Image (tube, rainbow, N blue to C red):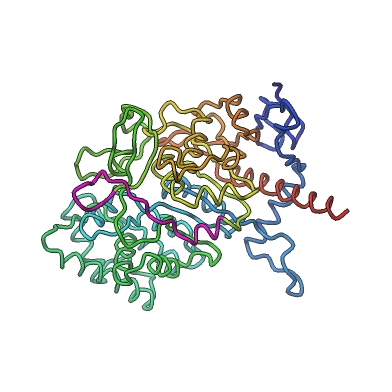
Amino acid sequence: MALVACPRCNITPPQASACGIRCLLRAPRSAASRPPPWRLRRSRAMAVYEGWHSAAAGADTDGGAPAPHVPPSLLVFSGGTAFNGVVEELKKVTTRVAHVLPVSDDGGSTAEIVRVLGGPAVGDIRSRCLRLSDESTAEALSVRKLLGHRLPIDPSEAKLEWYQIVEGDHTLWEGVSRPYRETIRAFLVYFHSEILRRSAEMFCFTNGSIGNFFFAGARIFFQSLDAAIFLFSRVSQIPAESLVLPVISTNDRLTLGCELWDGTIIRGQNEISHPSNGRREIVNKDCNSCSTLPSRIKRVFYMSSEGSNLLHEVFPEVNHTVLEQLSKVDCIVYAMGSLFTSVCPSLVLRGIGETIASRSIPKILLLNGSHDRETAGLSASGFVTAITDSLNRTYGDPHKSLKNHTNDYVNAILVPEGGQVPLDIENLAAQGIFHVVTVKSIHDPKVGVIFDARSLIQALTILISEHMDMCVSKVQNVVM
């Protein structure tokens, strides 16, 4: 199979294309295996990108007429760290984004909250809400700084600073108006009272997140995760069209487990990705900080958090709002990050695979730039296989599994230039994936190669605009 020219600038790989994006497409063997004809010229695609950028920025139109470029709607499966780096750039193009996040994280200050107060993990949700929060006024920045603050590492210093904050004496309150101050402080006080009620459990404030404490106080007060997200979203003033959705809407604790190919069962998200050997310590997310697993991960699943049989598998119900959003968005994105503990926990739930397979839209994998403990040795097609197996629930209950094809779930991949994950193009082609595009990258000293945020969002925009143009052409052909 011969390499074909970049459809945007007519340059054959491996040369870098004039559009700044390098394509790694293979010529199809037959018409049956031919990739979708997403073939807009770069000038057209970039014009659409600029139009969406202007629309997202709130550009006015004469006479109150609707905006000529309606920004696309996306649903992003991600965790609370890796995709945060491109959220700001994505906001410049579209705020019509549903961010779907897991609630099974049991590391960091989230672990201490769950240990003492129970309930779902809120750290990833809080992190995304903060990234989406308003920065247009001095007060908005002060609120963001307060809710994004972490307490010191030293336990005594952390506890002292927490008391200063909860009593309203800390300098972090400067710039926060009285209505916001009273609202935020009320839920911090409520959180503190809940800790004091559980006198048998000594709460450790080390490296604690004020945003997590506020979030937990709101959740316990309302006895509703959705209500807590609504309040946090309003206090941090995230865009009205942006949704931060827990993949499971629950008030209960959730525990993630995984099965390795050698039969080993590991309990707890943190033990899978960043094991601490039972010690209370700050989670180190450096890509080289952990030893590899004894065997590759076969599947992830949810485990019982109560009772005597803690290895018992449970099947929580997916958040119905997630299914609603999946059924109407213009594009589905599987974000870079911890594949098995950030992305796959949202994919194994019943209803997710069924809904995604039913949509004829771009379904794009953002490939990691480096391996971590979970994905050591995996190639690009291995990442795709893991997503497919999770959505098909291949290794779970055979009566609840699906048999959908790989390209029913993933039909395009964006790859950071110079990444460490091998691009096995032949295997991707066998999976029915022909749209593989490399994007400019940068080097992060902690995690290695990552996407250049602006180039990534441009590449996403081009893929979506090409698909929309193809749909319009099909409709026009039918009419004619």
Residue 316 among those drawn in magenta: yes
Which of 83 and 293 lies nearest the eye of the viewer?
Answer: 293
Asked if residue 157 is positioned above or below residue 215 in the image, the reply reads above
Q: Position of residue 317 (x, y in %)?
A: 41, 56
Q: Position of residue 410 (x, y in %)?
A: 58, 40
Asked if residue 94 is positioned above or below residue 338 in the image, the reply reads below
At horizontal 67% and vertical 61% (from top left) the residue drawn is: 55
Asked if residue 436 is positioned above or below residue 214 in the image, the reply reads above
In the image, the segment drawn in magenta is: 304-326
Farthest residue toward the front? 399
Q: Position of residue 207 (x, y in %)?
A: 26, 52
At horizontal 18% and vertical 57% (from top left) the residue drawn is: 203
Q: Is residue 291 left or right of residue 231?
A: left
Residue 58, quarter of the rendered image: bottom right
Please identify the dominant SS of the magenta region.
loop
Q: Is residue 405 left or right of residue 447?
A: right
